[in-house]
Amino acid sequence: MTNGKVYLTREGSKLAEKGELNIYSQWISRIEGQITQGSIVKIYDFNGELIGQGFYENLGAIGVRILTKKDEELNIQYIVKKIIEAYNLREKRLRLNSFYRVVNADGDVLPGLIIDKYEEILVIQSSSIGFDKILKPLSQLLIRELDVKTIYIKNDQRSRREVGLQIWRKVIEGEKRTRTIIREEEAKFYVDVEKGQKTGFFIDQRPNRIELEKYVNKDDEVLDLYGYTGGFTVHAALTGANTTLVEESEYAVKEAKNNIKLNNIQNKVEIIRDRVENYLEKCNNKFDIIIADPPALIPSRNKVREGRKAYGNLYREVIGKIKTGGLLIASSCSFFLNEEEFMKILVKAAIENNRGLKVIGKIRGASPCHITRPRDKHLRYLKVIFAIVN
């Protein structure tokens, strides 16, 4: 049931017409009715024409989020219907299994909502006060409609803290469990949705971990930097490589050991708990394959210069430790670094080592389940380059 009306400015109307779902407060000209944060409102353009319905946010920069077209009614049944559509798309069209992203915010026209599935556990992250207010009844409906036994809310992301939303996480519906085992082709991994990063695992790198297996030869020497719980390492070792995983997180190292045992590859993997910079400085070995998947080294727009320098320093060290003809898998998850700039950093790092790069195919992105619309540039943050180093 709508509680009021929101009218957009001329600029806001143009953006909404182009498909923008997150309307900043500066693009709102006026509001009418009894509206509180999280209210469902009708949204009108500059000329008074109905655009659709959404959540009134007034949170950080966001004024309102558009969720429907003008002839659609926004309520919890509508949201459940959209989530089921997104779920069926991943299951039946993309034919994903075991784990995947069910809802990718704007990509599934549910701005402010992320839902990931790990076998029988569904993990929900909200960045919208509108979704926050309906999480309990929404979870009760989803556990009946989807093939899951547990719904876990993980509202602990930094972006919530920055806009003043409550930080919390817990099982909200179903069985009280936060741990499961997922399968990625022949690889198996423990996932702890409570203790793990993001919603428990880096789903976005799924196709890139699988592709790695195509290029691994038996007894290759592989180095997996920022290896987390062993995603790339397990795939390399299962293909026959001798793999060194470097990771500084105590939790991740412990879980990586569990995953190595789970896949019965203890004789193929060495785990080193250390900062990557320290390891590279001390390491004198050369490797057939190096995977470097660092955290976002450019976390915000005002960190671009120092972040580019950090990427340059990292890849200069990495390329210097690859054998001639070896493979580099270079990754950046920084939205504020585009593909062209990332490639320039890698080329410069190669030149500084008096080496050359031969790029294999196109620049890769996130798993197909991270669906985006053409305008959703902010959701296409991941860049992964496979290159031969000469």
Image (tube, rainbow, N blue to C red):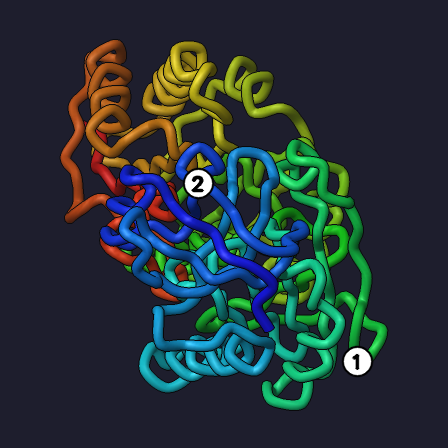
Residue type at tag 2: Ile
Determine contact: label 1, label 2, CB under 8 Å. Answer: no
In the image, is 58 to the left or to the right of 366?
Answer: right
Please state which of residues 364 and 351 is positioned toward the viewer in this rendering: 364
Q: Is residue 262 left or right of residue 237?
A: right
Quadrant where the image shows the N terminus: bottom right
Distance between mark 1 and mark 2 Cα atoms: 40 Å
Closest to the observer: 165 or 304? 165
Q: Is residue 182 visible?
A: yes
Q: Look at the image and tell me whether residue 210 can be seen.
A: no
Who's the residue at 34% across and 61% down the image? 51
Residue 165 or residue 226, whichever sits in front:
165
Q: Residues within 10 Å of mark 2 (few under 14, many from 20)?
A: many
Q: Residue furthest right?
A: 176
Mark 1, secondary structure of its residue: strand
Q: Which mark is residue 174?
A: 1
Looking at the rendered structure, the kind of residue marked 1 is: Gly
Q: Position of residue 342 (x, y in %)?
A: 28, 27
Counting from the top left corner in percent of width and height, residue 370 is at 40, 60
Mark 2 sits on what residue? 28
- Residue at x-position 26% and y-position 13%: 353
Q: For residue 211, what is the image quadrant? A: bottom left
Give the position of the C terminus as an image quadrant.
top left
